[in-house]
Structures are given as C-alpha cells and as structure tokens.
Amino acid sequence: MTHPIMFFFPYLYSGGVVGLFLWLLIIGYAVMILIADLIKNQNLFNIPVIISIISFHIYGLFQTMQYIPMIWLLIFLNLGYAMTIGDDVLPARVRRVSTLMTKLSVVLVGVGFLVYAAHFESKDLAAKYGLRIYSQDQERDQYAGFFQPSQRWQYGDYRWCGKRGAIYVPGGGDVGLEFRCQTPGVEKEPLVLTVFHEGQVLDIISFSKEESVRKMYSLPETPGKEQQIILEVSRTWNAHKYLGNFDRREMGIGVKGP
C-alpha cells in the first residue's frame, strides 16, 4: 500500500461529504442496474462491466492509478454503458427511491453552487488565517507563465518562467527585480532576456555566464491598478536533460521580486 485511500480523499477535500455521496450514488445506481439487467435479461456482458467498476474503486484504495487522466475514460465508458439500460429492469419500489434520490441530488448540487459562490476561492478561510488568498503561495496571482517557487537550488528561492512570463505589479512605481541565469552553454550561445512594458522594450540583458543580475525599473504609478512586465528569453533548458534529475520543466530565467 503506497497511498492508502488516495482515490476517495480528492472527493472529500474538493467536493466534501456531499461530493463523495453523489459520486457513490452514481456508482451504486450503475452497479445496481447492471446487476438487475444481468438477472432479468441474462445479459452476460454486464459481468465484466461490473467487475471493472468495482475493481476501479478497490484499486484506488491502495494505489494512485486514477491520477492518470486517461484512466477516467474507462470508468465513464462503463457508466455510459450502464445508462443505456432502461430502469424498467428495476422493481417499482426501487425506481421510486431512485427518482427521489435524483431529486435530492439536484437540490444538493444547487445548494453546493450557492455555497461555492458565497465562499469563492475560500476567501473566508484565507481571512480566518490572516492570508491574502487561501494558498501556500501567496503571490501566485502576481506571476503568469511561471512555475512554483523553487527552493532546491543552492542559489535561492527563484521563480522560474518558461519561454515567456508576466509579472503584475500593483500600483506601479519603482520595481526591483533579480534575474538568475542558469542555462547551460551560455558561454557559446548567450541567453538573451528581453523585458517589455506596454508593448515597448524596457530592457535587454545578455547572459554569457551563469550569474545573477539585479535591475530597477520605473513604471507609471497607477493606484488601484496593476502594471505588467513581460519577460521573454531567447531559449529554455531542461534540467532533466542536462542534470539527469526528475525536473522536466522547460525553464527560461529565474526571478526574485518585486
């Protein structure tokens, strides 16, 4: 067992108890109608479908197979097949109960939508813990086209962008940035970083060695609004290819600040 109950935890922390209940309701109904059709119409094709649905969930208790998006295609193919079976194979009492549960599910989904709208992006939880946003990375919305901050490098916790990235500066004004070039082979082929603001070239920095460069830029002051700085590099590099590690990101330049 490498990741116990990994399959059901995402439903609990993303959809809560209601989300988990709705999913199990769908699965339970699908298995029930498949079994009823098997008994009533002797449809033997239902057997592998039932086994597939059950094994999908049992395997998810012990392994993380479901993190692969293509795997979900299999379960929804099974559910789609189950939905082609008419509910007339079920006893009248069971059909009445299933109709009632369907109405209850619609109500729960509607209530869930209203609750989500009232607590969009978990703003209440963020306020409870004194955070600007409910996220470990408090500055995630300030960077577009960037990876998560990296603290594994001996050079510090730089944010690495890809080929192109954007930095949003609330209010504008003087902005200090530190750029880190770690691209292999810059001695032969320098890395060129171009900094844009409002479509105009703000700066061009050429790196011919692995180094850090600090820059200061003056942007128009716009209280209550954001100024955008665009970064674009001449090429990227892959740490897995050059260093043989598990980092497969295509990285351009590392950034600290503003």
Image (cartoon, rainbow, N blue to C red):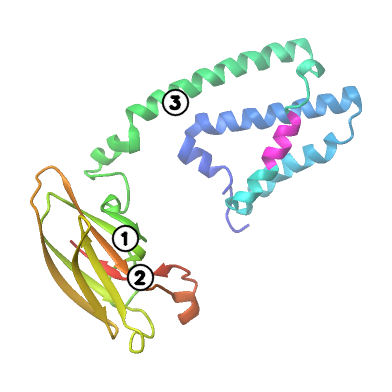
State the residue at coordinates (50%, 32%): 17
Tell me which amino acid carries mark 3: Gly
Task: Identify the residue under disc 1.
Answer: 165
Name the spot of residue 71 as percent of width and height, x first: 65, 49
- In terms of secondary structure, where does tag 3 sit? helix
Q: Are marks 1 and 2 in contact (CB under 8 Å)?
A: yes
Residue at image location 76% in from the left, 10% down from the top = 92
Within 10 Å of disc 3 (Cα), the crowding (few <14, some 14-19, many 20+) is some
First reached walking from the N terminus: tag 2 or tag 3: 3
Q: Where does the magenta region start and end? A: 75-82
Q: Residue 237 location, x and y as percent?
A: 42, 75
204 up-or-down from 103: above or below:
below
User: Quick one: which residue is furthest to the front in this view?
Assistant: 200
Separation (CA) of disc 1 from disc 3: 35 Å
Extreme residue toward the bottom, this view: 188
Residue 152 x/y as whole percent: 36, 72
Question: Which of labels 1 and 3 is toward the front?
Answer: 1
Which residue is the site of mark 2? 252
Query: What kind of secondary structure does the magenta stretch mostly adopt?
Result: helix
Residue 112's disc is: 3
- Which amino acid, mark 1? Gly
| Element marked by disc 2 | loop
Instruction: Please determine whether, in this image, residue 62 is positioned above or below residue 85.
Output: below
Nearer the observer: mark 2 or 3; the answer is 2
Which of the marked residues, 1 or 3, is nearer the chain's N terminus? 3
Give the alpha-carbon distance from disc 1 to disc 2, as whole Å: 9 Å
